[in-house]
Amino acid sequence: MEPSFLVIQSLNGLASASSLFITACGLTLVFGVTRIVNFAHGSLYMIGAYTAATLVPWLLQFYFGPVTFWAGILASALVVGLIGVVLEIVLLRRIYAAPELFQLLATFGVVLVVQDLVVQIFGPQDILGPRAPGLRAPVEILGRRFPSYELVLIAAGPIVLGLVWLLLRKTRFGVLVRAATQDREMVASLGVNQAVLFTGTLFLGAFLAGLGGALQIPRVAANTGMDLSVIAESFVVTVVGGMGSVPGAFLAALIIGQLQAFGILIFPKSTLVVVFLLMAVVLAIRPYGLFGRPEVVGGTHAVGIVSRKPRSSDMAVAVIVLALLACLPLVADAYLLKVATEILIFALFAFSLQLLIGVGGIVSFGHAAFFGLGAYGAALGIRWLSAPMEAALPLGLLLAAVGAALIGAFVVRLSGIYLAMMTLAAAQILYAVAFQWVEVTGGDNGIVGVWPAEWASGQTRYYLLTLGLTASAVLVLRRVIDAPFGYALRAARDSEPRAEAIGLNIRRHRWLAFILSGAAAGLAGGIYAFSRGSVDPSLLGIPTSVDALTMLLLGGIQTVTGPLVGAGVLHALRDQIMPLTSLWRLFLGLSIIAIVLIFPRGLVGTVGHWREARS
Amino acid sequence: MSLLAVRDLNKAFGAVVAARDVGFTLERGEMLALIGPNGAGKSTVFNMIGGQLRPDRGRILLDGHDITAASPQKRFRRGVGRTFQVAQTFLSMTVAENVQMALISCNREAQAGWVPAREHHRPEALELLAMVGMADAADRPCSALAYGDVKRVELAIALAGKPKLLLMDEPTAGMAPRERAALMDLTASIAVSRAIGVLFTEHDMDVVFGHAGRVLVLLRGEIIAAGTPDEIRRDPQVRQAYLGDEHALEKPEAGRPA
């Protein structure tokens, strides 16, 4: 390999490191002060890109020159900063004290809202911005041509780092930001005006996200997928650097930029995998990132299942519901049965997540990994082993359980937000593998022809099979939740010191919970694959994970039956509303935010609470 | 052989020496208080014995077994029970279930997955709760209890593991004076009847001098005095350490609740 090529490649790495740092720096600052992991940070980045790609060409009409270009970029970042202020005042301010799961979900609600709004405002097409005036000609480096705009980007990272450093060291605002990052309670008790501090931090964070996005316009067309891709990378940067640490983010961005630039030479298709593997290795060695500190992660506010006297009517209700469901094929048409089958599958998927979140207090944000592994396991079995359904379903379950065992072994060492990020990353790795390993997984198109066995085909028969499998799996999980194993998980969730002091091996329990939960989700995934006849990478994507979380949230995290009800309601709503409007995500996002703010107990929890209050 | 033998424990945090050559023994049925002004290193010593901290040097022997490097879980299996300065219970469970959980763990059934947990060891749990006077509250949620009652439940949880050694970090912190004496009387009677050695730290001198059989005084990480409550009260070095708070060491007047 020629040295000049290596130089160019590392310059490319530096340029992407700069962009990544500018965006991630905002995320880490906001986290440091507010302790909120702002999922919508990627959306702010996307708004920055769209705004700049629209605003800058418009400005260039009036006066063509570098000044106009850069003014447009800055103006776009300022606009995004103001949107950040609105976000803080309208939403974040109300959830600072909420459990981190609710914070993640609420800000993900914003992601959904922004996705639809961006399409409404800017249109569905990608928008490529103008090239920067004065930087159009490439420069020659060691005999190779290199875009001069990239050189500016390389400089932009350190410049932003320097400015942020000055801001943090030399201004009163900066002193407060640093103080709040170290000890939020202390700053609060010193009589600092928190509202201004938090709003200001959100402005700064959003401004940096907007700047990061705006700077991309000459290189990448603004598109509707950039929010989730950049948020995943920013999460990696902040987690590897240590949440809340600006220098950590810079160092992590540098490492990741180089890793991507050279990783592409070794694994041309799987740079994402390399990046997430780095994160896994760093977290395995330093559970709080390179420069993070343990106390940065506040105590997890455990919300979840509490003990409840078993009612004698519970069993009767379960039997009646099951009997009614079994009779459904007598009255329902094929379409309704198809919807009902899907609801059952998602009910199992959500219920499997309840074991981790509601029982164990383990906020897994990548549960799609296991659902997808189950689906792919079944589909791969059909395609490559020509296995019958009876073998392919258990194969999917097994693959999901093995995946959960591997991922679980890594993440049970972590806690709180790091665990959430790591599970998300694990799911993204699998997503990337499914997407990029075309020869085996079929890539974007996935695998088709995943049909059930003869005896189980037909809408009615498959529905009944699904009902039988789902009911059995839910029954088993239900017993486990009530049994000593479930109680031990709850014990570790309620009080780790107490659980250790009575001799419970917390990590082992959590690891086993991952395997069990993963296996159940894998079963759901396998059934889903056969119900649709195909699998594709979206089964492993962030939206699938969030679906399960939304079902939990909607039904009620503190209840055992909540996820089942939540799955039914969400899927029924989606089925009814999605065909009517192009704004389904807007609707869903606003609903998630509303639930977090108004009904944090969810449907089943709220009903139960009313009942208790009345008696 | 002593129940607990602590030898030459040392622990430093950076330049701050939190424990220097700390050594003492504790016998079965004995109530040993560890006192000292704030920052004397009580919690450090306590957490090294409890397994939350690893000493830089020194050894901790329980019944002759070296537990210096053992995890809190291993110590539990060897017979160490503990309560925390801020009571640690399982707030999502009922009072009885809290104790049942400890019994389940003690019997190594924590991975059982079919029979409901509430059906495990309930009679035994109720017995322990009766011992601490909480039997009536067995089916109430632990989160609904007054703090003094939570402390009693925590004691029952700690006793569920049939400990030989009970570690109590500020057992009466946050309790009303009357409750304090009652809890410590209860602890003392259990210690004697079950031959449990109790090591506790405490700020309330009434509790210390009223209930400890022996007292260790820690100052800047070192033990400066050890002896019966009366010896400690008379020790000039100890008075010096508590300078400005000398009355704290005077004998409680007659008539005052001990």
Image (tube, coloured by chain):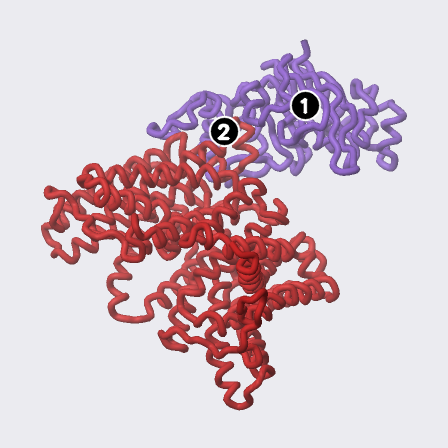
Chain colours: A red, B purple
Q: Nearer the viewer, residue A611 or A101?
A: A101
Residue B50: image location, x then y, percent: 63, 27
Q: Nearer the viewer, residue A485 or A63?
A: A63
Residue A475 visible, this angle: yes
Q: Which residue lies under the disc numbered 2? A: A504
Residue A89 visible, this angle: no
Q: Are marks 2 and 1 in contact (CB under 8 Å)?
A: no
Q: Amino acid at mark 2?
A: Leu
Residue B126: image location, x then y, percent: 46, 24
Chain assignment, label 2: A
**Which numbered tag is attached to residue A509?**
none
The quarter in which the C terminus of chain B is drawn is top right
Q: Which residue lies under the disc numbered 1? A: B199
Chain assignment, label 1: B
Residue drawn at (74%, 36%) of the image: B13
Front: mark 2 or 1: 2
Q: Is residue A567 above or below residue B191?
A: below
Dot 1: what SS?
Answer: strand
**Residue that sits furthest to the top in the current view:** B1
The quarter in which the N terminus of chain B is drawn is top right
| A198 on left or right of A561 | right
Residue A301: image location, x then y, percent: 52, 47
Dot 2: what SS?
Answer: loop
Residue drawn at (50%, 89%) of the image: A61
